[in-house]
Amino acid sequence: MSRAGGMNGGSCNLASVQVRFVQTEQDFVRARTAHAWRKYGPRGRLYRRILQPIAGAFFLAVAFYAYRRGDHGFAVLEGAYGFYALLIADVIAPYFHRKAFRRSRMKTAEVILTLTDEVVCCEMPGLSEERIQGDGFVGVLDWPEVMLLYLSPAMFLYVPKRVLSDAEHRQMLEWFGEKGVPLTYPKMSRAK
């Protein structure tokens, strides 16, 4: 991976695309959600959205039946499974993402992402500045609300789509395509 911090690694003055935004809690939650659901295509996400509440209702029905039979331990266990299945995607996971955002020191930071011919410059004035070569990216995941720029399978930068025009979005995808970055999430490599 070619990453050069500080002022090395190319000039950010010759920008082909420059995006400025202040991170919001909603953007952060959307990016983390996209990362968590990265392995599923639109159809897979739809199936999970439909099947999770059905599974939750089934477990709650089994819990109710077990409680009526007098098997209280089993009823509590099945009830917990049911509530978990009903709440995980829309309540529990976003709660933890919001909590992580509030703990970060980046919640009010402006992000300036600049694509040049050679590098991607990511600057957060007063906090950090990075210059990342094109081959430093291992994948780009383009979702309806957010674009994830993967540096490794578990580390990514994100750009909310609300700050991109259609032309900028297209230019960014073309830039990564020219650099040979796959337009999908990176797969984890297993140690042999």
Image (cartoon, rainbow, N blue to C red):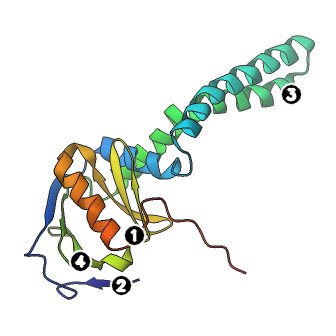
Point out residue 52 in the picture as x, y percentages from the top left corner. Answer: 64, 30
Which of discs 2 and 3 lies nearer the camera? The answer is: 2
Find numbered disc 2 in the image and state the secondary structure of the residue it sits on.
loop
Q: Quadrant of residue 158?
A: bottom left
Report which residue position mark 1 lands on: 181
Give the CA distance from mark 2 to mark 4: 10 Å
Left or right, residue 33 beside residue 114:
right
Give the spatial CA distance, label 3 vs label 4: 57 Å
Which one is closest to the eye, mark 1 or mark 3? Answer: 1
- The residue wearing badge 4 is 119
At x 80%, y 20%, the residue is 63
Q: Which amino acid does label 1 sit on?
A: Val
Residue that numbered label 2 is attached to: 2
Q: Which of marks 2 and 1 is nearer the N terminus?
A: 2
Q: What element carries label 4?
A: strand
Q: Is residue 23 left or right of residue 80?
A: left
